[in-house]
Every structure is written in structure tokens, then in C-alpha cells.
Image (tube, rainbow, N blue to C red):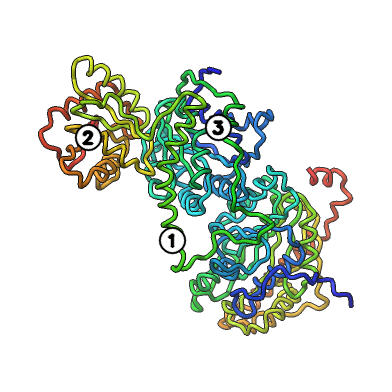
Amino acid sequence: MKKVITGNHAVSYGALLARSQVIAAYPITPQTQIVELLSEFCASGKLNAKFIKVESEHSAMTACIAASATGARTFTATSSHGLALMHEMLHWAAAARLPVVLANVNRAMGPGWSVWTDQNDSLSQRDLGWIQLYCESNQEVLDTTIQAFKIAEKVLLPVMVVLDAFVLSHTSEPVDIPEQTLVDKFLPPYDLKTKLDLSAAKSYGALTNPDHYFEIRYKIQKAHDEALHVIKDVDNDFYEHFGRKYGVVEAYRCEDAKVIVVTSGTISGTTRGVIDEMREQGRKVGMLKQKLLRPTPVDELRSILYKAQKIAVIDRNLSFGHSGIFAQEIKSTLYGLAGAPPIYDYVIGLGGRDVTPDDIREIIDNTFKAESPRDTIIWRGVRL
Amino acid sequence: MRFTVPEKELMFPGHVACPGCGGALAMRFALKALGEKTMVVLPACCWTIIDGPFPMHSLQVPVLHTAFETAAIAAAGVKAGLDIQGKNDITVMAWAGDGGTLDIGIQALSGAAERNDDIIYTCYDNEAYMNTGIQRSSATPKGAWTTTTPEKTPKSEPKKNIMEIMNAHRIPYCATATLAYPEDLINKFKKAQSIRGTKFIHIFAPCPTGWKMAPDLMIKICRLAVETNIFPIYECENGLNYSINIKPKNQIPVVDYLKPQGRFRHLIQKDIEQIQKSVDFEWELLQYRASRDFTKSKNIQSQAKK
């Protein structure tokens, strides 16, 4: 059934169709509509879930972790400061190997207060063991939310579905909402093998001395290695059920491209249009949309980007004192490949400043013209 | 005399508590009361250690360890997860120290109490951060030495009244208990188990290590705390109906309680007189609260049950 819905409501429908059993959430702009609609689903009986209206995001993540440890399917949504407040428990979810699914609406961190989009909130949680998937459209948001549960439960890692504030969260698009029966076929009930259970008086998360701790961390990394395959399998499986797939990265018109623009989130949509326009003018330019940040899809990134002459990475984020974070990711992925193309790091649109087709055109033009890459950030749109 | 403490043990003797630990004995009694259909949530506290390092585990019920400030919501999350799977006959108990309850965990505890989440929340109160090596918490009594309130500047603020904070949430059941009165303690856990909603049990659980006293004085100091009215044993239903469960026959001066504990050895006569005054004041206040009979007001009783 097609419906015109916002990105936020696309998340809600995803969590509904996945038959989330325990939801715990706290309001924060621009996420709030996700849990408002889920509250209505619970109130009307459309969704049979326990909804814990917690007093903080820290408690929201804790409730999901604890419920997940009993074998329940759990979901929460947050944004920005809410995600930052969860930080300690985001570590806990990953290290406890619990398949919690979280939707994060990318919103800039204060101060000054901002409700508008950039990626520093989710990227600050990059190194914790969570799988991170960045979405471009409302359809992708809904589909990825459903996929997230399947991925999480297969590899026992938590999954973060990421969407841009307002550009997706509050923007309506036509979205195909799958049939429940089909989603049920795709995503069977959650069956956690090792869980809090009276039949076995086990303790979970106990004091772990240096004889055991290291191996537990090693296994998280192994789970990420496995996740790379599982995410692709789940995407293919999703395609067989619903006729849509996204890939861990998407190479858009990258064949014979001299310049490849690396994007994530909604900037991909803006870039897509510019690429089409420039291709019509005979410019050899393509786009690589990085949907999956963790685990890093190394093979895909290398095989696509290696063929370009130049790479322009668009970062709506910044690791202060270094550079854009996706640029760091791409640089480390290509490091050591003989003849790898130079990488240009464009930082743009922090705090929700609009990123227009003109900006993308300038970035591409600048990259074509540039002689050798500078080690420094190339700022776009900073008013000095 | 009939022995009413259940004989079944749900705690192995091989735990790693210090000698004379009040917190260890409190868990043993609590589990005797609650039985096998119980799950325990442990935030960072002495019990993180006492239960044993991985792969050891000294309790015969499942335990979920969680972060310091999350005991109440983790228990509520476990309960919600079990309930939605139809496993609604399991008692879920959060078991936290005084730092985890009165300080860092009070936000999550207040949240759970406001929602009336169906859990038993136990605070085993040893009146300081003992697991990190005796630092003051908001449960440390006025005048006490800790490593962060040295003898020259002992704690200058009175102990936070967590029972009144919890009573103000009008949760169905709040109670104090201590180890010198195991039957009272066990009865309170059984009562808590029979009530739906948030139950709060505050256990006075001495730490001989941190209180600088002989381990074999643990039970005696519990009894002295009650007989001096330092730690009255009472309960409160719906935040309204107070009852004092153990009434000391003769009030003993607080000095008898303070003297065996090294943490109070720097106190001078004037300090002890002040402590006596404040204990007398609190005791009178509690007696006044317990004397109010709301059961006669049908209106208040029916409101309280909402």
C-alpha cells in the first residue's frame, strides 16, 4: 500500500511491521514523531508492545538492553543530545551482544542549540560496535528499519538506522508500506538462544578479568566481519520479498567516471540530480553513496573508488582538529593501494545549512580543476 | 520458638564479600523470601564483586549486571520483556547500593516509581561508596569519616532521606529493614512480592571495612541502630499509611551506636549531642506520621489506591 508519509513515520511503520515487543523512548526534536505514532499504534492495539515512557534517553537504551536480554524484540529512537546521553549504554548494548534497533535522526549538537541536521551525533558513536546504516529516502528508511532487525538478530549486534533531520524526518514522500504477512515471512519472531531465563541461573555482564575480556572484544570484531556478509544477504532476501534493495554502498554512474563524489544521507539525492545533469553535458562524474558505515564495506569501496582519477568526499560532519569523518574513512580504506586516487575533503552544511545542487556542482568543478589534493579541509559555504 | 526464616538457600557460600558484610547477608535473606522465580538486576556496587567474576556466579537465580545509574530502569526493562512474552509470574528485583540509589541512580528510580513499574527496588545502604574504597555518598551520615570527608572535615550534611523521597511518589509499598531482624526483613520482601507496582525496600547494611569496626559487631550494630532510633524499622503504604514495625523498649543513647565505629571516633561530646538531637527530632516526626490514621478517611484511602 502506497502512502505519503514523513521519514519519521516511515521509521514508525518499520518498527510496527517488525512487531517490536518493547519500545522505550524519550521525546527529542526532530525524532519525537516516530514515538508519537508508535504510541498510537500501541494504544489502538495495532502493535502489541510494551511502551515504556522513560524519563531519559539513557534509560530508554537501558530498558531496551534489559528487555532484549530476556529475548524480546526492542526498539528506540532518538537524536543528537539524546544519542549522546545514551553513549554509555550504547557501549553496553554492543558489548552485551544484544540486537537492539535504534533510529537516530541526525541533528547537530549544541551549543548553540540547533535542531537541524548534521552527522556529528551518530559519528560520535562510530567506535562502539554498532552497525550504522545511513538512509537517503523515506522508502529506504522504512525498508532499512525492517532489515535492521533481521541483521541485528542474525549477528547479535545492535543496529542504528540513521536519517537526516527535517530533510527526511519531516518531509513527506510516497512510501510503499509492505503487507504485514510478507514482513512476517521475511522477519520471523526473535528467538534469542542465550537469555535471562529461570531454567539457567546465569549472570550476564559480570566482572571480567584480563583473562577473558580481550576475547569478548575480538568476538565483537568477528561479528562485524560476519555482518558484512549478513547485511548483503538480508538485502538480497529483502529484494526477493519486496522487490527493493539498496546495497552496502551504491555506485551511481561510476563507470568510466574521472571524479567520484562520496556521499551519505540525503546529500546523495541532491548529488544524484547533479550527476545526471553533468553526465548529459558529457562530464565523466559518478557518485558513491555510502549507506553502511560500520562495518566498513572495504571491498566495495576499494573496487569502485580505485577506478576514479579523483575522489571528492562530502562531509556534513567534522572531527575537530582533523578532518571530515567520511574522508578519514575513505582515506584509511584506500591506504596502501598503489595508484589510489587523491581524495578531496569537502566539509559542508554543518548545523543544517542548506546543501544545494549549486554546492555539489562547485564541489565537482573544483575537484576536476584541482591539481593536487591539499591535506586540509576544503570548506564550502563558510561565511567569514 | 518456631523458625520462620525459609531454609532453602539461593546463595552459594562461595561469594567474595568482606567478612561481616551486611549487603551479603541481606541478599541471602531477600532471596530466601522471594524464592527461585526471581531475577536480580545489579548495577555497579559491592555486589558486582560479591556475585563473583565471570564465569563465577554466587546466586542461584539469573542476574543481569548493568551500569551504575540504571538499576531501576534495567529491572523495569527485564519485567517488560518477560511480560510481553507471557512470563508474568517472575519477580524482578533491582539491588543497588546507596550511591547507586540516592545519588547516581535516583533519576531512573524516580522514573520507575512515577510509572509504578512492577519491580522490587532494594537499596542496601552501607552509607558510602564502599566498593571504590569508602567515599562519601548522600547516604553518609553527618559527622562520619570517609576518604573524601577526612577527620578534620567530616561530612557536614545530614543523610538524605530516601524513604521520604520514595513515599512522596505514592508507590504502593516502601519499607526499611535490617539484619538484626531477619524475620521482619523476610516478611517485607514477601509482602513486596505480593503487591503489583513499585516496591522500595531500604536495608541498613553495615560495612565493617568502611565503618572501621570489628566484623563480628555487624548484627549488633544493626540492633543498636534500631534501638537508638538511628535507623527506625517502619513501612509505608501508598505514601500515606505509616507503621513502625519495631519499637525499641528503652531508647538507648546514640553514643552506644557511634562508639564501636572508627568512622565516628573523632566526634566530640558536642557533636554527639547534636546527633542525639537530630535523631530525637526525626524519631518524633516518624511517630507523628505513624500516628496519623488515614484509614478513617474514605476519601483519602480511595484516592491513595488510584
Q: Position of residue B283 (x, y in %)?
A: 74, 67
Give the quarter of the figure containing the C terminus of chain B: top right
| Residue that numbered label 2 is attached to | A379
Identify the residue at horizontal 67%, vertical 31% (top origin): A43
Q: Position of residue B49 (x, y in %)?
A: 56, 69
Q: Amino acid at mark 2?
A: Trp
Whichever of callouts 2 and 3 sits on the residue coming sooner in the sequence is 3
| Residue that numbered label 1 is attached to | A215
> On the picture, is A148 further left or further right than A49?
left
> B278 or A190, which is in the foreground?
A190
Q: In what element is the residue under mark 1?
A: helix
Indicate the chain on which mark 1 is placed: A
Q: Is residue B140 visible?
A: no
Q: How far apart, in angstroms, are the residues tagged by discs 2 and 3?
A: 44 Å
Q: Residues within 10 Å of mark 1 (few under 14, many from 20)?
A: few
Q: In what element is the residue under mark 3?
A: helix
Identify the residue at horizontal 83%, vertical 43% (top origin): B302
Q: Is residue B227 visible?
A: yes
> B210 or B31, which is in the foreground?
B31
Q: Amino acid at mark 1?
A: Glu
Closest to the camera, between mark 1 and mark 2, is 1
Residue lying at the far top of the rendered structure? A280
Q: Amino acid at mark 3?
A: Phe
